[in-house]
Image (tube, rainbow, N blue to C red):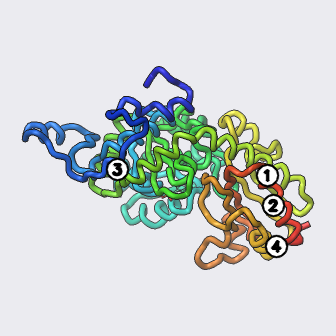
Amino acid sequence: MDDFSSLETLLLYADADDDAEPGVAPPIHAAVPFSAPSAEAFAELSATPRHDRFYRRYGSPTQTRLEKVLAAAEGAEAALATASGMGAISTTLLALLSTGDHVVAQHSMYGGTLNLLKDVAPRLGIEVTFVDQTDTSAFAAALRPNTRLVMLETPSNPLLQLTDLRAVAGLARERGIRTLADNTVATPVNQRPLECGVDLVVHSVTKSLSGHSDVLAGVVAGSGELIDRIWHTHILTGAVLSPHDAWLALRGLRTLVMRVRRQNENALALARFLQDHPGVAAVNHPGLPEHPQHDLAKRQMTGYGGLLSFRPHGGRETAERLLSALRLVRRAPSLGGYRTLAVRPAAMWAIELTDEQLEEAGVPPALIRVAVGLENTDDLVADFERALAAAGAA
Ligand SMILES: *Cc1c(COP(=O)(O)O)cnc(C)c1O
């Protein structure tokens, strides 16, 4: 589908060559084994990477359609869809790294990614150095002769700090080191890591790409050669996406651009409202001119995304009262769904950390993270206005 370059149209037509039937929407291929007409046909399959008509752990026609659309969305040659975002990240690491290798990652990344790098990687003899993502020179200083991968995530969660993708990808490339970027928070509507020179993009498709809070899925996208390599590990680790979830993710993807644009608008409007509210001490959103990396955001992003965080005056009790006073907005983790969700990140750890430990992690106890949905902007802002008053934040 080289005829289209706009993301809106690619999301609708990148898999159109697979329309086998007159139906204008894809079917769900549930079969696990596929039959072949001859022994030669099976032999040919086993010599072909990424085949999707043999046994469903290797791939399925429904998964292939999803992968075509996901690859197109990121401007990638190929994509591999997985059972979750963590499935994409862990399979990629397992496929590309060996004992003795070194990884450079950010202090601030998705919790699951951090735990994988802190708890699992060392057991496999893989060393990881964590750096401040806002400081490009810290990445350069951390690189070693055995560094094989640099892992990036921008904007980060919950503080919305940015990584300069072009700069970091450039300095890694000069030394022959691969880069991987988690683009879940920004989405391909707002940010295109491959165009910045990054080698691999991963997503929790669970979030904005599927968009309805009812699918768990992931993807890794990049060159055909790298994705083939990751696929060879993936069919052995076996965390494969079900065709039902692939179909739901595909269904959600068709409307990605409209949804993300609305979320961009809602988040910026809410961030501006909170910024001006006397009951709010601080707001983090890359679209605000006050954000310390707003210039980088303008260079690197075409929209600023649906995620923001803020700290009301009055500490964690005020933040808790505020969350309880919201009427539309649900107290829940995750992001990118149709409803606005809010959570106090400090309360998401099973045993709450001490204030000192939280400060060390850069997460104030009263910080509230908001993942905006598709509500009418005035209704959304009004919900926060009412809750701030009810919580006595002003
Ligand atoms: C949710 C999330 C993940 C993990 O994705 P799952 O689909 O839950 O496995 C990874 N990275 C980011 C940035 C996320 O928000």
4 or 1: tag closer to the N-terminus: 1
- Residue 177 seen by the camera: no
What residue type is disc 3 on? Answer: Ala
Mark 1 near ligand 1 (CB under 8 Å)?
no
Does any portion of residue 264 appear in the rendered image?
yes
Helix, strand or loop for disc 4: helix
Q: Is mark 3 within 8 Å of ligand 1?
A: no
Marked residue nearer the N-terminal end (2 or 4)? 4
For the N terminus, the image quarter is top left
Question: Pointer 3: residues within 10 angstroms few (<14), some, or many (20+)?
Answer: some
Q: Earlier in the sequence, mark 3 or mark 4?
A: 3
Comparing marks 2 and 3, which lies closer to the viewer? 2
Amino acid on which disc 1 is placed:
Leu
Taking 87 as reference, is 320 above or below it?
Answer: below
Residue 180 vs residue 392: left or right?
left
Q: Badge 4 local density, few (<14 within 10 Å), some, or many (20+)?
A: some
Helix, strand or loop at mark 3:
helix
| Farthest residue, direction left | 39
Pointer 2 local density, CA inside 10 Å: few below 14, some 14–19, many at least 20? many
Residue 44 % position (x, y): 15, 36
Relative to 357, is 121 above or below?
above
Check disc 2 and report its element: helix, strand or loop.
helix
- Which residue in the structure is indicated by mark 2? 384
- Percent across and percent down for residue 94 are 36, 54
Residue 343's quadrant in the figure? bottom right
Residue bearing mark 4: 318
Q: In the visual, does 381 lie left or right of 52?
A: right
Picture quadrant where residue 301 is located: top right
Say what amino acid the circle numbered 4 marks: Thr
The quadrant holding residue 213 is bottom right
Residue tagged by mark 1? 270
Q: CA distance from mark 2 to mark 3?
A: 45 Å
